[in-house]
Amino acid sequence: MAYGSGETITASDYNVLVKNIKEVYNDSPSVERIDDSYGYGRTLPELNEVEPDKIIENSEWYDLFLIIRRIATHQGTTLDDEIPEQIAKGDIIEAYGTLTQAVEKVRGNRLTVSSTTTYDIKPLGTSTRTTEWDEQIVHQFMLKFANKSEARYFFNTGGKITIYGEREGGSDTGINNAWTQTLKDVDNIIINHSSTSSSSGQVAVDIGFYTLTLSDQKIAQKSVGVEDLPDISNSLGYYASDIYIVDAKRSNDWTELYFTVYFRSEDDDKLVDGTLTSTVSAWTVTSLRHPSDPELPDLQPIILPTYEKIKGIDESQEPIP
């Protein structure tokens, strides 16, 4: 930066800061964007560059610092002494020589979410089966965003898609108990911007929104009745031929995400019964929607995808491929 503590803050200095912060907090045109992982899509409070030779107003300095702090809080980024904890409207404007480092920190941590953040969780769709099965049943669905930008904003801000399987009731048999326990062990399968994991730690692959392709990729797989072995190729167990699998792919324009959840049983003489459910939900952070400053309105909601079921687990079984 051209400025330092005790020196004049120029419009060009301020505009560089604003541009760099807006690339994270708001967005930038696709032709100027470094990559799609920049951009939260937030627009309040409004932050704009100023005309050359314009005097920077206190309110503009205040909003810039407020947004930097809000981003840092959302990310869990520690700014130490780079900028003051708080400035108030009416304070005297002064330059902070380490402000550039603060901006670079939050840019570098743009896809990080604080471990203390809270989420709003909304179920998008559920498929349920109450009839017995002994081959393969499938929950296939599409999640559709209005456009690629809304998909980017959802994942860039820390949004997650979760898939949760559950079996309960029915006969007290070994295969029923194995499916019940396996689905509990896996818990939520979590898809974020760049990876897929599970609440239990039994799923971990480097495939997320930005690494989806036009063809199906396996993002989760767990053998039934086998503990702590997510890869079937190395599995041995009571029902090692029964498998819980999730595949995913995207559309060419990045607005449609396709998921196929397989419940596969290859034990012909053992029927699975009871109630089986497969639920998909969207998780969105609250840290960017509910500013602590009472003088500012709530930020616009993060837009969720819509759910469309392609095939349900209540439909006819499929032969094992």
Image (spheres, grey):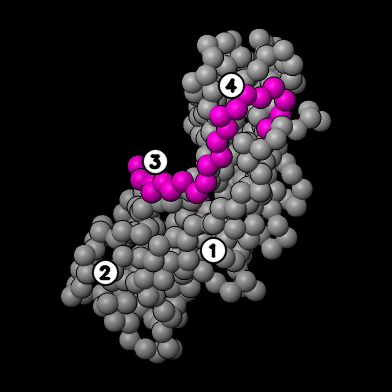
How crowded is the residue under tag 4: few (<14 C-alpha within 10 Å), some, or many (20+)? Answer: many
The residue that mark 1 highlights is 150
The residue that mark 4 highlights is 273
The residue that mark 3 highlights is 115
How crowded is the residue under tag 2: few (<14 C-alpha within 10 Å), some, or many (20+)? Answer: few
Image x and y of residue 35, in percent: 62, 62
* C-alpha gap between disc 4 and disc 1: 40 Å
Mark 2 and mark 3 lie on one chain; the one further toward the N terminus is: 3
Q: Residue furthest left?
A: 90
Mark 3 and mark 1 lie on one chain; the one further toward the N terminus is: 3
Q: Is residue 116 above or below residue 253?
A: above
Mark 4 and mark 1 lie on one chain; the one further toward the N terminus is: 1
Q: Disc 2 vs disc 3: Cβ atoms closer than 8 Å?
A: no
Mark 2 and mark 4 lie on one chain; the one further toward the N terminus is: 4
How crowded is the residue under tag 1: few (<14 C-alpha within 10 Å), some, or many (20+)? Answer: some
- Numbered range of the magenta stretch: 111-137
The residue that mark 2 highlights is 296
* C-alpha gap between disc 2 and disc 1: 23 Å
